[in-house]
Amino acid sequence: MRASTALNGYLTFPHVQQVFQLERTVTDLSGNPLRHEVANYITSLSTQEAPPERLGSLARGQWTIESHHWIRDGVYDEDRSQVRRGSGPRAMATLRNLAISLLRVRNIAQALRVLGRHPDWLCAALGV
């Protein structure tokens, strides 16, 4: 990882304190490398708030959040949801999060298909 605070005259974004670059190798579940990526980041955190070591952990934490959103959209097609009024969107997001938490498996889509054919399994697992 590389980080820099030498930004004067280069960036016009407001409140920029640091830029940093992360290089990572994406692997499959067996550890075989699939591709090499370089990601550039901009942050308003100062070097006192986030030294280079912390910037790396913050970036990794963001990918944890993004992977959860990818599951919600990839499996449940959340971005095209028509639920938009009142507390409906929050309730649906909560139900999706609950389902994801209950189905902590490698292939959530496959688990949903199986449970669609055997809803009694889910009821038994929940004690209903």
Image (spheres, helix red, strand yellow):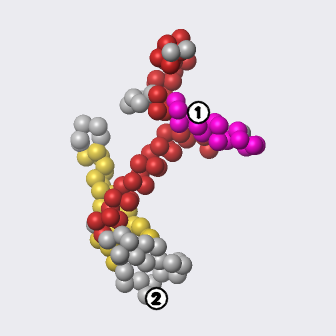
Where is residue 13? Give x, y as percent.
53, 77
Where is residue 8? Give x, y as percent.
43, 87
Q: Foreground: 119 or 125?
A: 125
Q: Is residue 58 visible?
A: yes
The residue wearing badge 1 is: 95
Most distant residue in the right direction? 85
**Type of amino acid at the residue the image marks with label 2:** Gly
Please name the residue shown 46% across and 23% down the image. Answer: 111
Where is residue 60? Give x, y as percent.
36, 55
Nearer the observer, disc 2 or disc 1?
1
Name the side, left or right, on which 94 lies relative to 60: right
Q: Which mark is residue 9?
A: 2
- Please tell me whether residue 33 is drawn above or below residue 15 in the rendered image: above
Which range of residues does the magenta coloring cover? 84-99
Helix, strand or loop for disc 2: loop
Name the side, left or right, on which 85 lies relative to 120: right
Q: Based on the picture, tell me whether residue 92 belongs to the magenta stretch.
A: yes
| Quadrant of the snapshot with the N terminus | bottom left
| Mark 2 neighbour density, 10 Å: few (under 14) some (14–19) many (20 or more) | few
> Quarter of the image holding residue 43?
bottom left
Most distant residue in the left direction? 31
Name the side, left or right, on which 51 lies relative to 70: left
Please name the residue shown 55% across and 18% down the image. Answer: 116
> Quarter of the image holding residue 47?
bottom left
**Type of amino acid at the residue the image marks with label 1:** Leu
Q: Based on the picture, tell me whether residue 118 belongs to the magenta stretch.
A: no
